[in-house]
Every structure is written in structure tokens, then in C-alpha cells.
Image (cartoon, rainbow, N blue to C red):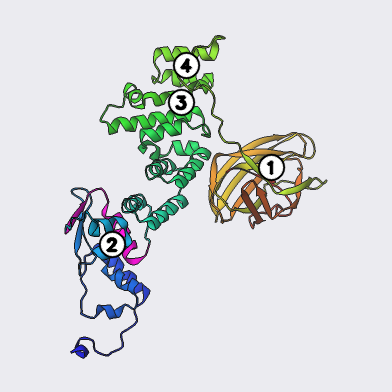
Amino acid sequence: MAAELYPAKKLPPVTASAVQQYQQQNISNNNTIQGCNWQGLYPTIRERNAVMFNNELMADVHFVVGPPGGTQRVPGHKYVLAVGSSVFHAMFYGELAEGEDEIRIPDVEPPSFLAMLKYIYCDEIDLCADTVLATLYAAKKYIVPHLARACVTFLETSLSARNACVLLSQSCLFEEPDLTQRCWEVIDAQAELALRSEGFCDIDSQTLESILRRETLNAKETVVLEAALNWAEAECHRQELQPTMENKRLVLGKAVYLIRIPAMSLDDFANGVAQSGVLTLNETNDIFLWFTAARKPELPFVCNPRKGLTPQKCHRFQSCAYRSNQWRYRGRCDSIQFAVDKRVFIAGFGLYGSSCGSAEYQAKIELKRQGVTLGVAVIKYFSDGSSSTFPVFFEYPVQVEPDTFYTASVVLDGNELSYFGQEGMTEVQCGKVTFQFQCSSDSTNGTGVQGGQIPELIFYA
């Protein structure tokens, strides 16, 4: 009888790709297994468990996942789920277990619930940008800590000015202090980009206030006001209010006093805020007196300018020099490659100036990664004939990720010879950040690791 059930024949090997293909099929379909000896096809318990993922075979519980109108019925196996989650263990085997065969979960999206089950059944983490936040919510709700940690790591690596404000809000909700700190680093350094991002308008009022209160926010106050009014307009729509200036002020509430209007220039105030309608007549009058009168009135607004961030400089040469025939510029490119071991934000470069008295240069600076331009600016700067470096900045600081080489380039246009660096270093320690340098094939004017231009990288960390 046993020989009939389990015939003695050699089974074909099961490849990893075949198992993955089956798992992927199970995400969309509640499959049943054909044949009575399917267990013999999979040599490890991990592979056999993976076959059970989203499978009706031997399912002893079902979940109706998703909000009304968007639900999906997902089969489960109590033992496997209880092994993977203490919440499921309490639900199925605890003292208060109810023994229901169908459990409704309206607050979790089906793709995120399936991503969590895939980890529990298959020991695989499958994350994507569209669902990672919802997957983190599911992992937190059902106490699956390793999956939650993977979600946070995924979010940290994909963090940018475009999504930093939204992730800040979510990180506080999920009580993830490390992710919160990473968000603040991006928001502080690239404040104007973050404030102008679409995601800024989606944050909650508590997160809005924490951003407006931020002392190290590296942004002009006019940009802060513009962002707050954009948020207020979106909030009016959420509350089904007409987006009039009166209603914008209403939904902003006391947060409006966190905008440092008295710290703006008189010109910005008079030609912008004072005519926008966001202030009352009395507030407008008092702020005008604040700017002009010797006896200043008390204001409900924060009056001191934000401190912003202090830029740091990575100087890669140990000395500089000049010669009668060097360093000359005729539209050729000076370039160097660098990498860091921690995320930083490149604000600009420090460049050498004329070695023959005062002179003016036009500089086109550029920052690239694998040939893709991340930042570019064309700037004029005046050098006084000294061997000092002269800073030139991008419009916005450029985010630089660790362990990847970036190319810093400058094309200078000027009639005078300049100083140049000597005794260059391949590795420089700047505070907690280590910079590594190597020569760039883009450099056509002689700059390399040992000598040349671009003596400094100006950055925030």
C-alpha cells in the first residue's frame, strides 16, 4: 500500500526560481496543490512552508483584509502564523482566543498584509516604495520586529527631500527614533526642497508645527511662509472649506506664529506678507513698527532668525602654490571623484583664486553620480589675490549617499593664473565623516588627487 502511495522514483530537483515562481503565483491566487506527494518535491521545511503561503490547502483560518469595497480574502494556517507573530499566537492559542474562522482586518491593505505573510511563511522580505509604509504598519500591529526593521531600513535608504516630511510624520507615529533623526537631517539640510515637495501638504498639523518650530531649518522665511500657506490650502480641502485666506489662517491656528515673519527683510515683508492678507491689520501695523520704530511692540511671533546649519569644509590639500605658467583656464574641466562613509549634503565647493592680484572668475560647478547630473550652477566670484579658497554654492544642497563615488567638476573662465593645491590626500576625516578621493576621467585640465583645483567640498552632515 505504501509503495502505491509513494512510488520509488527519483524526483526532479526543485530550483529556487521554481519556488519563487510558485510564491509569486500565490500572491494573486488561492492555490491548491495537485497530487498527493507534493511534500516530496521540496527538500526543506522552509520550502514546504512557502508552498502554504496564501494557499487554501489545510487553511484553518481566513482573513478579510482591506477597507470596505477593497477587501481580499486570504487563507492562513494558525500554527505557522502563531510561530511568526506573538499577536497571532495570542489570537489563536491565548487565554482569550475566540476561535473565529474568519477575521476581518479593515485597517491593513491587502498587498501589505500579504507581504507580511510572505515573510512569516517564506522567510523572505519583499518591499516596494508604494507599500512599505503600510507594510511597516502591519509589521508593527502584529509585532513582527525583523520585518519592521527591514521596512525602516528601506525607508532610510530611499529617504530624500521629496518624501522626508511625510516619513517624518510616519516615523513619529510608528515610534521609530532613528528614522525620525534621518528625516530631520534631510529636512534641515534641504529645507527649501522639502518644504516645496508635494508630500509636505499631506502631513498632519502636529508635524507641521514641529517643522515650523525647527531652529536648524536651512530655509528663507519667505519659503517657510509659502509652504505653510500651501499646507493650509490642502487642509481646507480636507476639511471641505473654501481655500480663502481667512480659512487658511483658521486652519493654521497658532502655528502661524511659528513663522518668523519679523526675521524677514523689510522688503520681503512689505512687498509680500503685508499684502498677502494672512495677517490682521493690527498684526501688520505692529510688525511695521517692529521694523522701523525705536520702541518696538511685543509680538506673538518668534522674532529671532533661525540659526540654520553651519557648513563644514573638507580640505583635501596640505599646501598650495603658484607658478608662472600654472594654473591656467581655457574652458577646460577640473574634476575629482569622491566618496563618503555617511550621508552628507554637498552645498558647494571652495575654489582657488588669482595668484596675480585681484581678478574675477566665472565658474560652472557640477556634481554627478555615474554620469547623471545631480546639481549644477554657474556663478561669478571675485578673488583678492590671496591663497584663500572662495566658496561657490549650488542653489540647493545635493544629497550624497555613502559608499558611492561622485564626480565634482568645475569649468573656470578667467584671464588670470590661479593658485593650485599640492600634497593631496586620498582620505580625509572631517568630524564623523570620512572622504575618499580618486582621479576622474572627466578632468582635462590637470586636476587629480595629488594637485589642482577644487581644494574644498562644502557640506552639511
Q: Quadrant of residue 38?
A: bottom left
Asked if the residue under mark 3 is in contact with the one under mark 1, i.e. CB atoms within 8 Å, the reply is no
**As shown in the figure, which amino acid type bears the numbered disc 1?**
Leu
The answer to which of marks 4 and 2 sits earlier in the sequence is 2
Q: x, y percentage for residue 88?
A: 27, 57
Instruction: Describe residue 117's horizontal placement relative to residue 386 as left or right.
Output: left
Asked if the residue under mark 1 is in contact with the one under mark 4, i.e. CB atoms within 8 Å, the reply is no
Residue 272 is at least partly visible in this image = yes
- Vertical placement of residue 11 versus 64, above or below: below
Q: State how far apart marks 1 and 2 are (Cα).
A: 60 Å
- Vertical placement of residue 266 versus 391, above or below: above
Q: State how far apart marks 3 and 4 are (Cα).
A: 12 Å
- Per the image, the residue denoted by label 4 is 299
The answer to which of marks 3 and 4 sits earlier in the sequence is 3
- Per the image, the residue denoted by label 1 is 351
The answer to which of marks 1 and 2 sits earlier in the sequence is 2
Q: x, y percentage for residue 267?
A: 52, 20
The answer to which of marks 1 and 3 sits earlier in the sequence is 3
